[in-house]
Image (cartoon, rainbow, N blue to C red):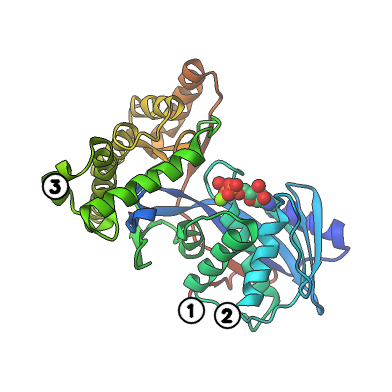
Amino acid sequence: MQMAVLEEAFRHTYGYAPTFLARAPGRVNLIGEHTDYNDGLVLPMAIDREAVVVGAPRDDNVVNLFSLHYNEKLSFDLGTIARRQEHHWSHYVLGVADALLRAGHTLKGFDGVLGSDVPIGSGLSSSAAVELATLMAFAAATPSLQLSPLDAARLAQRAENCFVGVQCGLMDQLIAALGRAGHALLIDCRTLAHQPVPLPEGYTVVIIDTAAPRALASSAYNERRAQCEQAARLLGVPALRDVSPEELARRQTELPPLLARRARHVVRENQRVLQAVEALRAGDVAELGALMNQSHDSLRDDYEVSSPALDAAVEIARATDGVLGARMTGAGFGGCAIALAAQACVPALTTNLLAHYPKRTGLTPRLYPCSASDGATWHRLDDRLRQHSLHPC
Ligand code: ADP
Ligand code: MG
């Protein structure tokens, strides 16, 4: 984000200078797709695109927040938080305030300006970035507010579940809270145990937004979830997380063929996440790329959530020298793919995608080369060196 633009907008809106900056990143999932609701494993990284609030505490209970993107100011009193009828960006902000108050925290108001360079609605979790940036703005305005990363993530998730009305899991909020520069984050979606995993230097994760509409996404998502639950029931386990690839291979005749394929994706994908972590710890980037390729092929063939646009992006990326692997990321049927590329090869990858993807799909891709960044922080604008994060110091 261009901080000067935000600070200038603040001065213009409120007639004085902001005193703090709160920020939280978007995210992309490197591997571990459709495993979260099977109590499985995911490996997201926080990206160097973020939602930012520049602000100043107020002495009363009023929150003013101007959204640069929507060119609209939200003003509310913490004592009277009301939802609108229709979907509105303010719900993410109001929802965070509501969740914090319901959890018993005392909050102070603030004046703020919100900006973000996380693309909206592309599956890079611009929503969790806004939630966590808002939460950090409250932390900056309210000295008594101390939250652990897990509490912060849960409160932001509650805002999205209860106030916005989107039944998301916890992954987006957890990585936005806990990301670490240069690292991905292994998350066990059953226990919420998590650990940073170092990413190799000299490689870039290029996010390829296919610009394809996600037409079937929500109905197919619900259907896949139901199929996984049914497969787990038939196998007599709480979740597909509890089945190893070997056990599934032995028992696959106990499942109808379609459910067996769905289950095969999930159990192998969990294993691939563990293999990817091992490969990263061993510095074996080629192996990580191979696992990403296998993940995509499994999502395309066994889980059937890819699309012609995602397949085209992945195939073009894979055909570029210096690309070690490529896969769809997110729920599927559109949204984004990612490619793991040697840094020096990113320009060639960009050229190839811009040349061939539109010919194959009629669409123009948007490309975001990314590096892994830190999770949510805030600092005083006169003391940029003293970053406050959610990590208990
Ligand atoms: P995503 O995959 O990007 O998270 P969502 O539909 O979950 O997509 O969230 C997008 C919503 O988050 C937007 O419609 C808007 O309400 C809110 N949002 C995202 N970025 C901003 C922003 N810069 N300013 C205000 N609201 C934002
Ligand atoms: Mg979202």
Residue at 27 percent across and 53 percent down: it is 232
Residue closer to the observer: 224 or 197: 224
Residue at 63 percent across and 81 percent down: it is 104
Residue at 33 percent across and 51 percent down: it is 229
Q: Tell which residue pokes out farthest to the left in this image.
A: 250
Residue contact at pointers 1 and 2, CB within 8 angstroms: yes
Q: Nearer the viewer, mark 1 or mark 3?
A: 3
Q: Position of residue 61 (x, y in %)?
A: 79, 76
Quadrant of residue 249 within the rendered picture: top left
Residue closer to the observer: 171 or 180: 171
The kind of secondary structure element at disc 1 is loop
Identify which amino acid the numbered label 2 is placed on. Answer: Gln
Query: Can you see residue 273?
Result: no
Instruction: Name the residue carrying label 1.
Output: 392
Which is nearer the N-term, disc 2 or disc 3? 2
Question: Which mark, residue 251?
Answer: 3
Q: Quick check: 294 left or right of 18?
A: left
Work out whether 338 lies above or below 29.
above
